[in-house]
Image: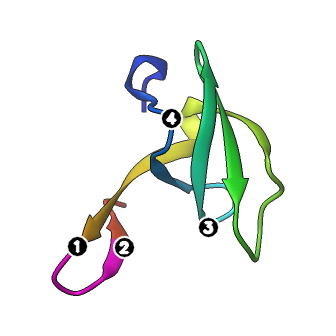
Amino acid sequence: MKGRDLKVNTLYYSKRFENFGMCLATAEFMAYILFAQGKGVSGWYHCQELEKSFYDDETGKVWTKL
């Protein structure tokens, strides 16, 4: 993912931690990610580590392109 594609209040998937997190802030190519549970420590992460997640309203499931 490119730094210009980062958006606040968006769910992303961390390839390093294999976990979903919410983007709370952005700064050029960095994003502050808040992880809800499991693996991963909330903090600043490089945009290359993140992938855009998608939420399906019908099934209520979150998925990502891997």
Please name the residue shown 74% across and 74% down the image. Answer: 37
Q: Describe residue 48's horizontal placement relative to residue 54 as left or right.
A: right
Q: Tell me the colour scheme of the image.
A: rainbow
Marks 4/2: CA–CA distance: 18 Å
Q: Amino acid at mark 1?
A: Asp
Dot 4: few (<14), some (14–19), or many (≥20) neighbours within 10 Å? few
SS for dot 1: strand
Q: Would you name the residue on which mark 1 appears?
A: 56
Question: Distance of mark 3 from mark 2, alpha carbons?
Answer: 11 Å
Query: Closer to the camera: disc 4 or disc 2?
Result: 4
In the rendered structure, the answer to whether residue 21 lies left or right of residue 7 reads right
Q: Which mark is residue 8?
A: 4
Residues packed near mark 2 inside 10 Å, few (<14), some (14 to 19) or many (20 plus): few
Q: Residue furthest left?
A: 58
**x and y percentages locating residue 48 in the rendered image:** 55, 34
Q: Are marks 1 and 2 in contact (CB under 8 Å)?
A: yes
* Mark number, residue 62: 2
User: Which residue is labeled 3 in the image?
Assistant: 19
User: From which residue to which does the magenta span run?
Assistant: 57-62
3 or 2: mark nearer the eye: 2
